[in-house]
């Protein structure tokens, strides 16, 4: 290791690894330090239940990853990353056995909403589908780390997306479209009436139409492993099993980049109360299942979808989000996000068996057990589900926070995605990656564009770092 590194990155999640790669690609000497014994952060794969069943402890489907401008600019396929596309990106089943779908095709998606909302949906998304690649780059660079490539489309998107999603959903007349869109917003655990939540739903829908909601062959660990292998080929170093408690634990460097929560950064760097106004969101309760066969969804469409949203209607989804984020209680009928990777990747489980996960929202730090409530909810849409369960691994907020220090209170988004904090995080600033220390930066999901396995927070932070390094 050189006597003085250009940059040290703390945390080997997708954002930390992306920041390290971006710096190494530009000729800077970089080393990454990770507290756990393996890289990955929110993109890991482990045998949580039974031998041969490979589960993703957190993120499993990757609409933002496959569309990420940062990932798409890297040769990650050369390092083993292969995206697998299920027949349907996502399905949202209903109690009567029907389903709304989010398909690669705008027309197929619109048709699943019924005749009264099909045209409305097409008019909503079609202005943006052809400009998607420039739009996603501009949207994921906010606050602007570069001039927008297509300011007109970005402004049009803002007019549609900045109001609450409840305003946008008023355009729809029937429940299939309303429920599916409410579920899309709930992926960032934001109350449906919050600022810019319309944009959240639109981004997930447009991502599906552009490049689907794939899984990584072999599991999400493949993303982290590909980033790590690429970084090493560029001359970067990765040190695991290395917990950082203060800046003095790290080797000398010109810049320090933290893929950590603002809370951890303040503690390590001695920033005191600098981030005290930063809010963490509700937690999640997650169950990973080893199944004896596929999930017995009543709706045929759900059987071929990689991701399945579970919520009877938009009112039930809204009530579940309010219970966890505002009322401080676990919902009676939780909205569930579920992923079934083995419908498209049989390598994830022994022959004929399946892996499946489901999570519901709970209050921050909640210590109860939601397993029975989750399974009762699943049984409404997949009768006989419990009969397929061979083993389960449960993780509530305390377990999630112990497994990944960025998940404060079980918040897998590393910060509430509500109010101004959805767009301006971790502080209201045009320079969100900087800190009170001129050589210390933050690049986690607590910075724009926020949660998800896409590496863009790391990409944007690396820009700020290399500008600093080149000027000194």
Image (spheres, rainbow, N blue to C red):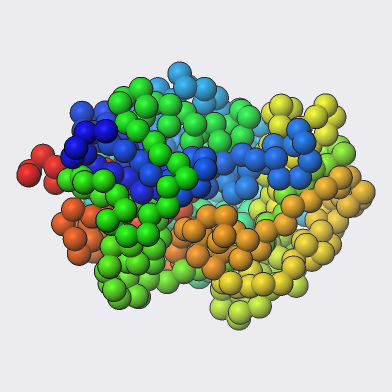
Towards the viewer: 128 or 320: 320
At 61% from the left and 28% from the top, the residue drawn is: 217
Residue 15 placed where, x, y %? Answer: 39, 44
Q: Locate residue 357 relative to residue 459 in the image: left or right.
A: right
Towards the viewer: 447 or 423: 447
Asked which quadrant contains residue 446, the reply is: bottom left
Q: Residue at x 65, y 40 (%)?
A: 46
Above or below, 370 relative to 296 = below
The image shows residue 367 at horizontal and vertical percentages of 67, 72
Q: Is residue 246 left or right of residue 406?
A: left
Which residue lies at the image location 37% right of the left edge and 59% below the top edge? Answer: 245
Asked if residue 442 lies left or right of residue 196, the reply is left
Q: Quadrant of the N terminus?
A: top left
Counting from the top left corner in percent of width and height, residue 203 is at 47, 48
Q: Residue drawn 62% across and 47% down?
A: 57
Q: Quadrant of the C terminus?
A: top left
Q: Who is closer to the viewer here, 87 or 389?
A: 389
In the figure, 50 relative to 190: above or below?
above
- The reply to whether residue 292 is in sight is yes
Q: Residue furthest top?
A: 78
Q: Nearer the viewer, residue 234 or 313?
A: 234
């Amino acid at each position: 290791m050189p006597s003085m590194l250009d940059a040290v990155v703390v945390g080997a999640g997708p954002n930390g690894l992306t920041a390290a790669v971006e710096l190494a690609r530009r000729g800077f000497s970089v080393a990454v330090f990770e507290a756990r014994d393996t890289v990955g952060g929110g993109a890991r794969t482990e045998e949580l239940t039974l031998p041969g069943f490979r589960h993703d402890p957190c993120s499993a489907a990757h609409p933002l990853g496959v569309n990420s401008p940062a990932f798409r600019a890297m040769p990650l396929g050369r390092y083993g990353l292969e995206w697998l596309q299920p027949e349907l990106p996502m399905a949202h089943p209903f109690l009567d056995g029907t389903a709304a779908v989010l398909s690669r095709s705008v027309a197929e998606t619109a048709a699943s909403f019924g005749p009264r909302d099909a045209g409305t949906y097409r008019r909503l998304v079609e202005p943006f589908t052809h400009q998607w690649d420039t739009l996603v780059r501009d949207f994921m660079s906010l606050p602007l780390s570069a001039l927008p490539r297509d300011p007109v489309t970005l402004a049009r998107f803002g007019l549609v997306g900045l109001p609450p999603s409840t305003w946008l959903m008023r355009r729809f007349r029937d429940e299939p479209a309303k429920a599916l869109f409410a579920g899309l917003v709930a992926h960032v655990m934001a109350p449906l009436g919050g600022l810019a939540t319309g944009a959240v739903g639109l981004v997930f829908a447009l991502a599906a139409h552009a490049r689907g909601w794939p899984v990584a062959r072999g599991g999400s660990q493949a993303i982290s492993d590909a980033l790590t292998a690429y970084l090493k080929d560029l001359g970067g170093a990765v040190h695991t099993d290395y917990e950082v408690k203060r800046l003095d634990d790290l080797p000398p460097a010109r810049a320090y980049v933290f893929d950590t929560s603002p809370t951890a950064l303040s503690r390590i760097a001695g920033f005191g109360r600098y981030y005290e106004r930063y809010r963490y969101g509700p937690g999640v309760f997650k169950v990973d299942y080893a199944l004896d066969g596929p999930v017995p969804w009543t709706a045929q469409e759900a059987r071929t979808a990689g991701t399945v949203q579970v919520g009877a209607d938009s009112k039930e989804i809204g009530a579940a989000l309010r219970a966890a984020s505002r009322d401080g209680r676990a919902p009676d009928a939780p909205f569930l996000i579920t992923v079934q990777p083995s419908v498209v990747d049989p390598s994830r489980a022994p022959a004929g068996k399946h892996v499946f996960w489901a999570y519901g929202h709970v209050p921050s730090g909640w210590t109860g057990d939601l397993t029975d409530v989750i399974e009762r909810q699943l049984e409404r849409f997949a009768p006989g589900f419990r009969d397929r369960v061979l083993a389960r691994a449960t993780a509530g907020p305390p377990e999630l926070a112990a497994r990944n220090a960025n998940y404060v209170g079980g918040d897998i988004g590393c910060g509430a995605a509500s109010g101004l904090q959805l767009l301006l995080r971790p502080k209201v600033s045009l320079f969100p990656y900087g800190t009170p220390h001129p050589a210390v930066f933050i690049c986690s999901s607590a910075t724009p564009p926020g949660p998800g396995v896409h590496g863009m927070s790391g990409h944007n932070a690396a820009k700020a770092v290399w500008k600093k390094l080149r000027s000194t």
